[in-house]
Each structure stands twice: as structure tokens, then as C-alpha cells.
Image: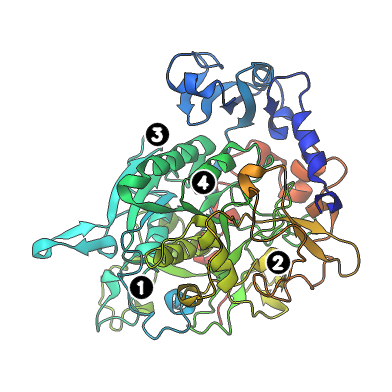
Amino acid sequence: MISRLAFRPSLVLTALTTTVSLVAGTVSPQLAAMDRSQSVQVIVTHTPASLPSLLSGLLSPVCGVLNLIEILPLGELCTMTVGDALNLANNASVAHISVNNTLTATGSPVYDYTPQTLQPSSTTAGTPNTAYGKNIGVAVIDSGIHVNADVMSPGLLGIQFPNVVYSQSFVPGEGPDDYYGHGTHIAGIIAGDGSNSSGPAYLHTIHGIAPGAKLINLKVLDRNGGSTDSEVIKAIETAIQLKAIYGIKVINLSLGRPIFESYKTDPLCQEVEKAWLNGITVVVAAGNNGRDDSAGNQGYGTIAAPANDPLVLTVGAMNTEGTPQRADDLMTTYSSKGPSLGDHIAKPDLVAPGNRIFSIRAPGSTLEMEVPADIAPLASYVKSPVYGQASNYLVLNGTSMAAGVASGAVAALLSTKNLTPDQVKARLMKTATKTFPQTSQITDPTTGQTFSIQYDLFTVGAGYLNLDAALSYSGGDIPSNENAASPVAVLGSGNPAPVYVANDSSETTVWGSTTVWGSTAVWGSTAVWGSSVWTGNSTAWGSTTVWGSNAPWGDTTVWGSTAVWGSTTVWVSTTVWGSTAVWGSSSSDGDPTN
């Protein structure tokens, strides 16, 4: 079925490996398209044969001592001109060279009722359950965690101990505390216990999904919400190394960047795969570009990296509408949609609450200083607010928040049953609620712009996360030797055009010999995806903008033009992906609630 792709993987591989000819290694299309005289940081991935010698210090770095910034798990981080980087690909020790790209966070209101929404059958979901997440370590790779009472646990003699059991900063010049405000918010969604809003004085106990979990704080986002591939790669590698010590079973990545090359060669994607194959469920935010219609594609094809990797659990954002009932919930307008550019991986895998989410505040952080209105009003959760009383919570939007919700659900599930990452992913996708309206219309109250949302496979994936259903599921899990790698989407012919899913047999590391989805199954299996997510109007996602053209990967109409990304500076600029305007972290940028 792979050959049925209008944008065929065989052509993608050709483009990737022939961008620069007569070389020992390959380079990313992004690097090959840059000005040869431009200075750039690059990630040099070594061949498997040369890697052990480099890491043991027996060989000098291939990019030269003067150009070396640091050694990375699969190679090295270097600085040089683009021309020198292209020449370096001739070195027999070099497998691939990529740009060290920048990443950013993806993140009077009414309470969001996320715990109740996630557990529609439970009568106690509004109260924190500290059994959820017990003995499970969750690595939060974000902007740091500011510890307060919501992430503390009682010890002997009433002494409080932080549930943050390990902290390390990978940001030069900054400690592990949270100066941006995003990581603390995510940590609260995952494991906050609601101590700052518990008791008769409060309207709601604002708590996380798995308050019994232990948090591992691996800081990569600076005080402005920016990071780089290399910093995130080092943090993921640290989580892998600390897995046995702190029981790390989950990594939360509420961050992302544009896709510049295939996941098969992208060093960031390769590192998340390494974590997954080491038994850690990696949960990634889909991205917040669902409103982008600059290419007439209605936000399709906007999944970020590393959410495009087929192994990880990619999460889009739903709007709870400020009620505990799921029946009125709607898809958000900003949640990024699949398929992934280039590889056409079917994403997101599922959706979870992510709009106007209440969680822990890091006082004085950049996010709240930029938009003070995001600080949760006391009247939204305190029965009788006292003058001068400070709010302990912040309200943010985004797939960042949805990823945090899903990470909490994974931790809760793993505290009740020992599952592999693929078994977790398959169970959550299979038990996700699959009842949606066919379409919905949402009007932005600020701009007056109306967005039409189609509830198809590239918007909602396998459905709406349902923790109750996942915990009580008795249908049997997939065998431990099978995997749940998200399949390649293949666009058929007809109107509406059917979509098929297929495994890429060339990628045995990802798909292996046995998979959940099969090789030719029509998307829409009632067991996994529901019966209606593929039958909608395919006009929106059937364009060459989404599925590619005869010149994949290296074609500027796909990668460098204003039509797709909105700015040609996306190739080299940090400002495009470093602003809250793009990622919609502020509550004022979210969708309205009823």
C-alpha cells in the first residue's frame, strides 16, 4: 500500500539521500538549502561503527576540536559554516548532519473540570486520588518546576517532601526553577494534588490526573520558552539513564518545532524512539497550528516534531466547555492536524482536554508577566476571596496541556497494570471515546473569525481520551512483542477519497515484524478509530500542500514558502516558534467556552 501514496516514501528516501551527492553521509534538506557561508549549529550523527570510539574518548571529534560544542548521545554538536558542514558529510564516520533547531512550549475563566471529564463514570474524579501514579516516575522535559504545596507529599512528623525527586537544568546560565511558567503548569496537570485548593473554603480542588506520581524535572526551556534540539536530546538521554533509579515510565514533551526532515533521520525523533524502545512511554503535544489556512489546507499537515514520530503518543487538544460532562465538548480550533509533512504519519493519536486548563502557577514567571489576566481569579475557585489573597493557579491553553493530561493518564494506568509503551498506546487509542459531531463551527470572540472543524482521523485520531475506559478495559492487551507505531496514511481515489493505513516495511526498527494496525486496513476500524473519522469531506486534506508534490522534502513550496509556514524565516529564526502568539499559551488565545 505504500506505493499508493501520492507523495511516495520511496521518493522521499531518494530526495533525502541525494540532496548532496558523492558523500559518505547524508544531510537534511533544510541544511542543504541554506546559504553556504552562513554560520550554523549542527548535530552530527555518527555511524554505528564510529560511535563507541568517540564516546570512549579514543578519537577526536570529526568536526574538529575548535568546532566542537559538546558530545551528544549519537554524535556531536558543532558550530561551523553550512559549506563546511556539507563537506563534513564526506567523512566516513558521519551518518547524517542536521541543523540544531529551536523548540518552544506548545501551551474571568470558568474551571475546566478536566479530571471529571477524563473519568466520566467516576463519582470521585473531583477528588485527588493519590493511588494514581504511585511508584511511577514522570520526566517533565520543559521549563522547570517551581515547587509549592501542590507538588509536596506528607512525611514523618508532618514534614512535607517535594514530589519532585530530581531536578537538572540543561539551559545555560539558568537553574532548574521555572522562570517561564510552563513546566510548573504541566507538572500540576500531571501530578498536582490540589493542596492549595482543598477544603470547605474552595469551590473546586484543582488537581492533576496522577497525584501519586513522582516528577523528574529536566529543564530545557529558558525564561522565554525557547530551547534547542541538542538540549532536549540531552534531557531525554538523562531520563533514559535515570529510568531505573527513579522508576521513570513516562516522558512528557509539551514542546515542538516544525518538521525539517524525515523522522527517520531527524536526531530529535531518533532520541524519542530510543526512549520508547527503552520502555518509556513518550507523550508529545501535537502542536498549535490548526488555525493555519495560509495554504488553503485548513490546518492539515501542521503536526510538529517530534510529535510526527510514529512511535510516540501524539495528543491534540479538546475544549471541555467548562463543564464536567463530555457531551458538550468540542475540538479546539488551534490543535495541529495530520498527516505529518513528508512521511504522512497518521497523527494525532488521540485528543484530550487542553483549553483553558487550570494548574499550578509559578509566581513572577514570564507567561504571567506577559498576560496577567492568565492568573486564575480567586472567585473562580475560592468561595469567599479575601482582599490581598494571592492566586495559586494559572490558566493556559494548548496541546501542551493536553499532553500533560495524557501523561497523567498514562501514569495512572501504569500504576495499576504493568504495560509496555506500545500496550499503553494501543489501549488508550482503543478505549478512547469515538462519538463526535461530524463538524462544528467556532467563532473567535476577539477577531470574529469563524472556524469549521471536521472530526476526521487527522483531527481527533482514535478519539477522546477516556481514563475510566482504559482502567476498566478487559478486552486483552496486544502481545508484548507487537507495537503500536502510528501508520502511514495513504490517500486513495474517489470522492470522498478513502484513506488506508500501511506499515513502512523498510523501517524494521519502528514497525518490526508484527504491528497492531496491519498493512492494508481501511482507516475507520470500529475497534480502534471508530466508524466515522475517515468518511468526511476529504477536500480539506486532499491537496498537494498536505500530501506533497513530485519534488518532496527539498521543494520550497513545501518547506520554505510563506504559503505553508507563514514566514520564510521559519528556516533559521527563533522568533517564529518562540512566541506565545504562535503556540497560543495564553488563555486569551484559546477557544471560547459556553
Give the mark toward the camera: 1 or 4.
4
User: At numbered mark 2, what does the secondary structure look like: helix, strand or loop?
Assistant: helix
Query: Sequence-wise, which precedes: disc 1 or disc 3?
Result: 3
The residue depicted at 63 percent of the width and 51 percent of the height is 310
Pointer 3 residue: 172
Give the residue number, with chain letter if any, for mark 2: 457
Residue 206's disc is 1
Tell me the CA gap for discs 1 and 3: 33 Å
Q: Quadrant of residue 543?
A: bottom right
Query: Disc number at residue 464?
Result: none
As rendered, which of 155 and 9 lies closer to the eye? 9
Kind of residue indicated by mark 1 = Ile
* Quadrant in the rendering for residue 236: top left
Of the residues under marks 3 and 4, which one precedes in the sequence? 3
In the rendered view, does 109 fall on the left or right side of 264? left
Label 2 – label 4 distance at C-alpha:
26 Å
Label 1: how many residues lie within 10 Å, few (<14), some (14-19) or many (20+)? Answer: many
Q: How many marks?
A: 4
User: Which is more toward the observer, 138 or 326?
Assistant: 138
Q: Amino acid at mark 2?
A: Leu
At mark 1, the secondary structure is loop
Visible residue check, residue 145? no
The residue under the point 36% across, 61% down is 361
Determine whether, in the image, residue 441 is placed left or right of residue 159.
Answer: right
Q: Which residue is tagged 4?
A: 277
x then y, percent, for residue 409: 45, 66
Q: Residue furthest right?
A: 494
